[in-house]
Amino acid sequence: MIKSAENMIFVFGSNLSGYHGAGSARAAVKEHGAIYGQGEGLQGNSYALPTKGKNITHMSLERIAGYVKKFLQFASENPQLDFQVTCVGCLRAGYSHSEIAPLFKDAPSNCYFDTKWRPWLPETAKYWGTY
């Protein structure tokens, strides 16, 4: 299923310092109410999912997996919201789609993903955008 990204919570990769200066993090500030200086959690119409440490340092895949688990729990507890999950961790954090996407394999049905992740997610996964 493909859904319009309009009216969805924009899930973006962040750093624990909340320096939302580039990429999807910058878009989150400009277009989705993200708060500069807040590196994790719901803010405005966005959700910061840490993929980099304080001062934009490297974060291990294991640590990112913990933040993904925390996000998935939040999404499960908020079924009234839909989440547009961007390809977090796949640009500035330096991980590949094949490393990050499988962390979301147990996502609840209110999570929608970039179609780039289709090869690593279950057949039941949902996607956002107009294709």
Image (cartoon, grey):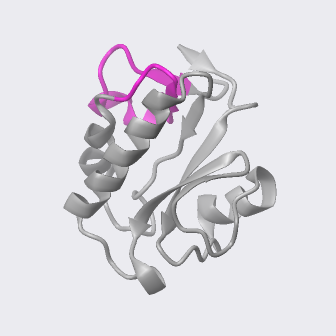
Q: Nearer the viewer, residue 23 or 85?
A: 85
Q: Residue at x 39, y 37 (%)?
A: 73
How many marks do you count on the picture?
Answer: 0
Q: Describe residue 60's horizontal placement relative to residue 87 as left or right.
A: left
In the current view of this chain or complex, which residue is farthest to the bottom?
A: 55
Which one is nearer the viewer's eye here, 112 or 92? 112
Is residue 96 shown left or right of residue 24?
A: left
Q: Position of residue 89 (x, y in %)?
A: 40, 58
Above or below 36: residue 74? above
For this view, does 99 lie left or right of residue 50?
Answer: left
| Side (left or right) of 29 relative to 56 | right
Q: Position of residue 76 (x, y in %)?
A: 44, 28
Q: Quadrant of the C terminus?
A: top right
- The residue lying furthest to the left in this view is 62
**Residue 116: quadrant of the picture:** top left
Q: Position of residue 93 (x, y in %)?
A: 39, 68
Q: Residue furthest right?
A: 30
Q: Residue at image x 63%, y 71%?
A: 20
Say which residue appears at 31% left-offset and 58% top-offset. Answer: 64
Q: Is residue 121 magenta?
A: yes
Residue 57 lies, with reference to residue 114, above or below; the image says: below
Q: Residue at x 29, y 21 (%)?
A: 122
Residue 5 found in image quarter:
top right
Q: Which residues are magenta?
A: 107-127
Vertically, is 12 above or below 111? Answer: below
x, y percent for residue 102:
26, 38
Please check the rendered image and state whether residue 120 is part of the magenta-colored stretch, yes or no. yes
Q: Residue furthest front?
A: 77
